[in-house]
Amino acid sequence: MKRVFNELTPECEITARMYAQGYEKKEIADLKCRAVSTINNQLQKAFEILHVRNGRELATMLYERLAGMKFTMDFPPIARSVIACCLLCVFSITFYQDFHSDMRRARRIREEKIEFLKDMI
């Protein structure tokens, strides 16, 4: 296994990587035959050394180091505008389809009621 978090001890790095990959603390403890408190201590030390606040930041750091590039959500204004327009179109089409299916359903129910009333008379 290639070392990614060289600042950490090998044992602490394994714990940090497992946590960053989505394992729960109890699962890590079971797999490593350690107490959950030991896992908590290792993660706390890893967060402190790596200057991250939570598991999401740890996971981002892991994948940035593995990929060798920085992930940012800093898009230029034009890209944000294009994404917003695309999402607006998708939501509008979805709303339009839902609205028309509701209208068809209501029309069908009305027609069924009229047929029922005609049968009653």
Image (spheres, grey):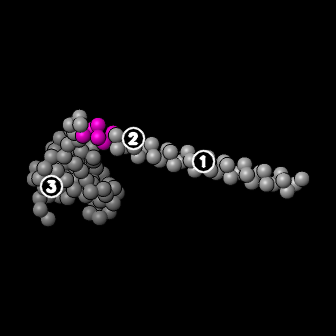
Q: Is residue 81 magenta?
A: yes
Q: Amino acid at mark 2?
A: Leu
Q: Judge the density around disc 2: few (<14), some (14-19), many (≥20) Cα neighbours within 10 Å.
A: few
Labels in figure, total: 3
Q: CA distance from mark 1 to mark 3?
A: 47 Å
Task: Report the front residue among 8 and 97.
Answer: 97
Q: From the viewer's side, name the closer residue of 49 and 69.
A: 69
> Does any portion of residue 71 appear in the rendered image?
yes
Q: How many residues crowd around disc 1 within 10 Å: few (fewer than 14), some, or many (20 or more)?
A: few
Instruction: Give the residue pinned by disc 1.
Output: 102
Reply yes or no: does residue 50 show up in magenta: no
Span shown in magenta: 79-84
Q: Amino acid at mark 1?
A: Asp
Residue at image position (15%, 56%) is 66
- Residue 112 location (% of width, % of height): 74, 54
Which marked residue is nearer to the observer: mark 3 or mark 2?
Answer: 2
Could you tell which of marks 1 and 3 lies nearer the N-terminus?
3
Q: Earlier in the sequence, mark 2 or mark 1?
A: 2
**Mark 2 falls on what kind of element?**
helix
